Amino acid sequence: MNTPLDLTVELDKFGRILIPKKIRERLHLKAGEKVRLHLENNSLTLEAAARATEWVEEDGLMVFSTGGKALEGDLVNEMREARIRELG
């Protein structure tokens, strides 16, 4: 179970806040990801938006999409070769 965090942050002149690194890490947030805000009784809650996972049609085939960026073929091959070398 995570230890609760209680932090105070400052709004910039445009009304934005920077989500502290400790919180981004706990929520596994990366640049460009969406967060959900909920306002109720003068309290604002921020949570990681559900990462979309669904079946989509791609080139006539149904594939499971996580909504993330696909790895390039060369990168996949490099990762595979590195793993094979590690396992020796």
Image: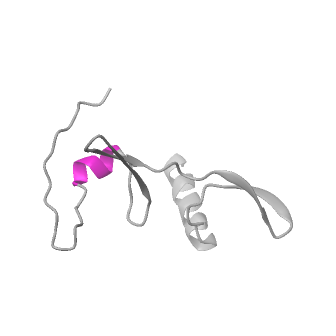
Q: Is residue 71 left or right of residue 38?
A: right
Residue occupying the far right of the picture:
60
Residue drawn at x 13%, y 49% is: 8
x, y percent for residue 31? 38, 65
25 displayed left or right of 61 = left
The image quadrant that residue 17 belongs to is bottom left
Is residue 22 a member of the stretch shown in magenta? yes
Q: Is residue 13 above or below residue 9?
A: below
Say if 9 sits above or below 42 in the image.
below
Q: Residue furthest front?
A: 41
Q: In screen coordinates, is 32 left or right of 22? A: right
Q: Main secondary structure of the magenta part?
A: helix
Residue at the spot x=22%, y=67% of the render? 15
* Towards the viewer: 45 or 80: 45
- The structure residue drawn at horizontal position 53% and vertical position 47%, both measured from the top left corner, is 87
Residue 19 lies in quadrant: bottom left
Q: How is the image coloured?
A: one colour
Instruction: Count up the numbered dots.
Output: 0
Magenta range is 20-26
Relative to 38, say whether 10 is above or below.
Answer: below
Residue 69 in percent (x, y) is at 56, 66
Q: Position of residue 1 (x, y in %)?
A: 32, 26
Q: Residue at x 24, y 54 (%)?
A: 21
- Magenta span has 58? no
Q: Position of residue 64 (x, y in %)?
A: 71, 53
User: 35 or 57, which is in the foreground?
Assistant: 35
